[in-house]
Amino acid sequence: MSRLAVVCGGSRGIGRAVSRLLAQRGCRVALVSRSQDAARATVASLHGADHVALSCDVSKEMEVQKTFEMIQKTCGHISYLVNAAGINRDALLLRTKPEDMVALLHTNLLGTMLTCRAALRSMLHTQGAAIVNIGSVVGLKGNAGQCVYSASKAGLEGFTRSLAKEVGSRNIRVNLLAPGFIRTDMTAGLKEEEGVRSIPLGRFGEPEEVAQAALFLLESPYITGQVLVVDGGLQLAM
């Protein structure tokens, strides 16, 4: 029987690449996106059949609860959860509006907490269940103009390590990926020729390369509570 993988933020960027790779590996994918149309379009492009597209704003508790209840009812127990849903609103702290602070924290941090909580009851019935949360190298090192975004991603590290301790005895593993500059919608406005100067490998990463790291963590039975940096060496220069 194929494993059921829930990918939040699965219709674009890293989440879409993860969804495609998991489908290629034979998983049944429940793809969660704020946009129902985007979710359906991505599901239609996945290898295999029986994948599911769902619309959900992960920052809203009741939407998350109803979505995961639907997944449990229609698809069965969850083996993998990948939290790739996120937003980015860069600005100096003095210019950041409180409503933007709330939106960043609710989507990037609270959203991951809510989806993990919703998935855990199902994962208790699955052998070798695993969670991968998508953070950022900025959450580890900080960056001017990204104070709130950095805080939302830094919080994921403490949350991931603590949750790994809570559920390890039930054989559920929880790890964090910290990507650097990856060629997605979030980095579309950056000048790549300037950014690569600080990257030892000399280029931005591709979403598929982060997806490979996510798959590694999902399938590695003796790794939990860890942070895997996928940044082409950027952290070395920070």
Image (cartoon, rainbow, N blue to C red):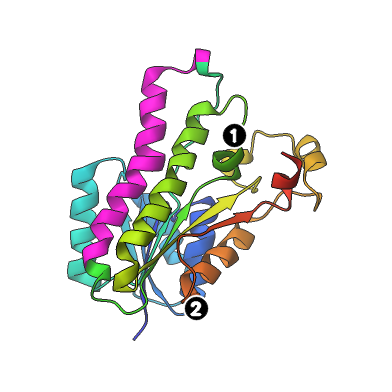
In 3D space, how far apart are the residues under numbered discs 2 and 1 (Cα atoms)? 35 Å
- Vertical order, 112 against 42 (above or below): above
Q: How would you rate the neighbour count of disc 1 (Cα within 10 Å): few for under 14, some for 14-19, many for 20 or more?
A: some
Q: Magenta region's main secondary structure?
A: helix
Instruction: Residue at 59%, 67% (x, y): give it.
Output: 212
Badge 2 amino acid: Arg
Q: Tag on residue 25? A: 2
Q: Is residue 55 visible?
A: no
Q: Secondary structure at mark 1?
A: loop
Q: Is residue 8 visible?
A: yes
Q: Tag on residue 164? A: none
* Image quadrant where residue 67 sits: bottom left
- Vertical order, 119 against 182 (above or below): below
Magenta extent: 94-121
Total numbered labels placed on residues in the image: 2
Q: Is residue 95 left or right of residue 104?
A: right
Q: Tag on residue 142? A: 1
Badge 1 amino acid: Gly
Instruction: Residue at 62%, 25% (x, y): give it.
Output: 144
